[in-house]
C-alpha cells in the first residue's frame, strides 16, 4: 500500500486496542460493486439423486438431527468457510423420506419452502394441517410454524427444501425449538388451506385471515402449469420467458415474505435477454433441456439439475430442446426489496446476449 514505517507502526499499535485504520481497508469494505463470493455452479441430478438414495441406507431422519437431507454447497462460499449455502442468502437441500418414516416436528425462525420432485403418499404437517405432497407442488413452511413430515405411501419421496438459513445465520437470528411430540397434533382437515384458498382469487366469506402467513400453504402443480400454458398466448418477458411468481392470495405479496418462488417456461428455441440483479437464485430444472449463460460461461442443464446464480451475475436462458423447458427457482428478491438494496441492470450489447467464453464442466 506504500504506507510509511511510522504509519505501519501506528496500525500495529491501534490493533492492540482492537481498533483499525479505515484508510487501510476502505476499498475492501466498500467495493465498487459486489465481489464474487458465491460462484455460479451447476449440480447434475444423477449425482445428487444417487447420493440422496445412498443416504437412505446410512441414516434415518431422527439420527440425522431431525431430517435426512443432502444440501447444495456453493464451492466459492465453502472456500470462505461459509457452509451449507447455495448462494450468499439461500440454502437448498434435497430431502428423502422413506415409506413409514417420520421427520419429527420442530419450528425455527428460518423460512422454508419446498418443491416436490418425486414420489407420492407423503405429507408435510404445517400448523395443524396435513398437506399431501405431489410432484410439482410448491409448499410453504412459514418461519416459526411447527412442521413435521410423514410418509404413508410405498415409494421413496424426494423434494427440494429452500431456506433463508445463510441470511438468518449472517444476522445471527436463528431460533429453533423441537416439538414435545414427534408429530404435532392435527387440528384441521387434510389439505385445509387448498380447500379454502386453492382457487386463489376467492376468499371464504367471513374469513378473518389477512396478511402473514399466506392462508394458502400449497400451490398445486395443475394450477401452476395451467397458468404458464395460458401465458403462452402473450408476448414473453424478454428476460424470463413465461414466468409466474407464487403469491400470498390474501395480500398479493410474495407467498413467503423472505423467499420468492418462481416458475418459468421457455418455449423451444427461446433465448432470453441477459440481465443481472442483486437478488440471487437457485434453479431446479423441472423439465426440458437447454443452457444458461452466467457471466460468459455456458451451463448446460437438463431435467433435475440445480443451478446457483449468485448476486449481480449476468444471466440469460436458452431452451435447446423440442419441448417446453420449465425452470423452478427460489430467490431472495423479497429480502433485497425489503432492505431497499435491489438493483437491476440490462445487458444492452448484441441484442442482449453475452459472448460465451467458456463452458462449465459439471461433476458427474
Ligand atoms: O424439513 O424442516 O433441508 O428444518 C433443512 C432444515 C429441511 C425441514 C432442511 C429443516 C428442514
Image (cartoon, rainbow, N blue to C red):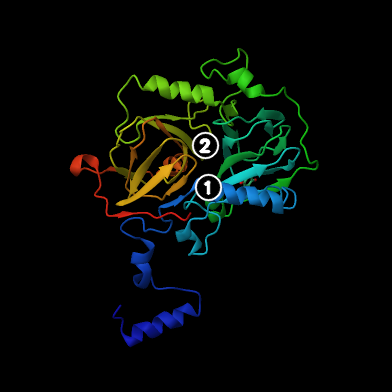
44 vs 242, left or right, is: right
Q: Earlier in the sequence, mark 1 or mark 2?
A: 1
Res 101 → quadrant: top right
Circles 1 and 2: CB atoms closer than 8 Å: no
Res 352 → quadrant: top left
- Classify the position of ligand 1 by quadrant: top left, top right, bottom left or bottom right: top right
Q: Is mark 2 within 8 Å of ligand 1?
A: no
Give SS at disc 1. Answer: helix
**What percent of the width, then of the height, locates residue 269?**
30, 33
Towards the viewer: 128 or 250: 128
38 vs 348, left or right, is: right
Mark 2 neighbour class, 10 Å CA radius: few under 14, some 14 to 19, many 20 or more: many
Q: Which mark is residue 238?
A: none
Q: State the residue position of label 2.
A: 257
Q: Is residue 9 above or below residue 189?
A: below
The Cα atoms of the two marked residues, 1 and 2, are separated by 32 Å
Q: Quadrant of the N terminus?
A: bottom left
Residue 249 visible, this orientation: no
Q: Residue at the spot x=56%, y=25% of the render?
A: 220
**What percent of the width, then of the height, locates residue 139?**
58, 33
Q: Is residue 350 above or below residue 31?
A: above
Mark 1 neighbour class, 10 Å CA radius: few under 14, some 14 to 19, many 20 or more: few
Q: Is mark 1 within 8 Å of ligand 1?
A: no
Q: State the residue position of label 1.
A: 46
Q: Is residue 243 above or below residue 308?
A: above
Amino acid at each position: 500500500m506504500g504506507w510509511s514505517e511510522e504509519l505501519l507502526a501506528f496500525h500495529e499499535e491501534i490493533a492492540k486496542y482492537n481498533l483499525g485504520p479505515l484508510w487501510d481497508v476502505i476499498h475492501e469494505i466498500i467495493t465498487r460493486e459486489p465481489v464474487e463470493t458465491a460462484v455460479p455452479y451447476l449440480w447434475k441430478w444423477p449425482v445428487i439423486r444417487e447420493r440422496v438414495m445412498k443416504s437412505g441406507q446410512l441414516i434415518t431422519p431422527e439420527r440425522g438431527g431431525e431430517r435426512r437431507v443432502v444440501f447444495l454447497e456453493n464451492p466459492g462460499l465453502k472456500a470462505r468457510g461459509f457452509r451449507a449455502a447455495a448462494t450468499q442468502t439461500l440454502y437448498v437441500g434435497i430431502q428423502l423420506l422413506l415409506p413409514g418414516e417420520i421427520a419429527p416436528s420442530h419450528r425455527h425462525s428460518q423460512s422454508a419452502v419446498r418443491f416436490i420432485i418425486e414420489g407420492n403418499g407423503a405429507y408435510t404437517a404445517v400448523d395443524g394441517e396435513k398437506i399431501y405432497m405431489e410432484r410439482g407442488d410448491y409448499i410453504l413452511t412459514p418461519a416459526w410454524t411447527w412442521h413435521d413430515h410423514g410418509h404413508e405411501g410405498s415409494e421413496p419421496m424426494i423434494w427440494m427444501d429452500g431456506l433463508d438459513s445463510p441470511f438468518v445465520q449472517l444476522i445471527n437470528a436463528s431460533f429453533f425449538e423441537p416439538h414435545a411430540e414427534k408429530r404435532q397434533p392435527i387440528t384441521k382437515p387434510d389439505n385445509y388451506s387448498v380447500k379454502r384458498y386453492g382457487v386463489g382469487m376467492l376468499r371464504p366469506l367471513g374469513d378473518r385471515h389477512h396478511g402473514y402467513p399466506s392462508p394458502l400453504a400449497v400451490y398445486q402443480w395443475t394450477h401452476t402449469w395451467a397458468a404458464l400454458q395460458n401465458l403462452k398466448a402473450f408476448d414473453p418477458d424478454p428476460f424470463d420467458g413465461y414466468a409466474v411468481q407464487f403469491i400470498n392470495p390474501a395480500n398479493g405479496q410474495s407467498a413467503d415474505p423472505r423467499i420468492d418462488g418462481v416458475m418459468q417456461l421457455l418455449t423451444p428455441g427461446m433465448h432470453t435477454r441477459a440481465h443481472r440483479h442483486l437478488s440471487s437464485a437457485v434453479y431446479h430444472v423441472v423439465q426440458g433441456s437447454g443452457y444458461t449463460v452466467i457471466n460468459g460461461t455456458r451451463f448446460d442443464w437438463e431435467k433435475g439439475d440445480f443451478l446457483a446464480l449468485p448476486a449481480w451475475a449476468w444471466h440469460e436462458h436458452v431452451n435447446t430442446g423440442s419441448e417446453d423447458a420449465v425452470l423452478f427457482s427460489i430467490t431472495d428478491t423479497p429480502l433485497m426489496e425489503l432492505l431497499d438494496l435491489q438493483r437491476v441492470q440490462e445487458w444492452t450489447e448484441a441484442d442482449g446476449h453475452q459472448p460465451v467464453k467458456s463452458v462449465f464442466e459439471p461433476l458427474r
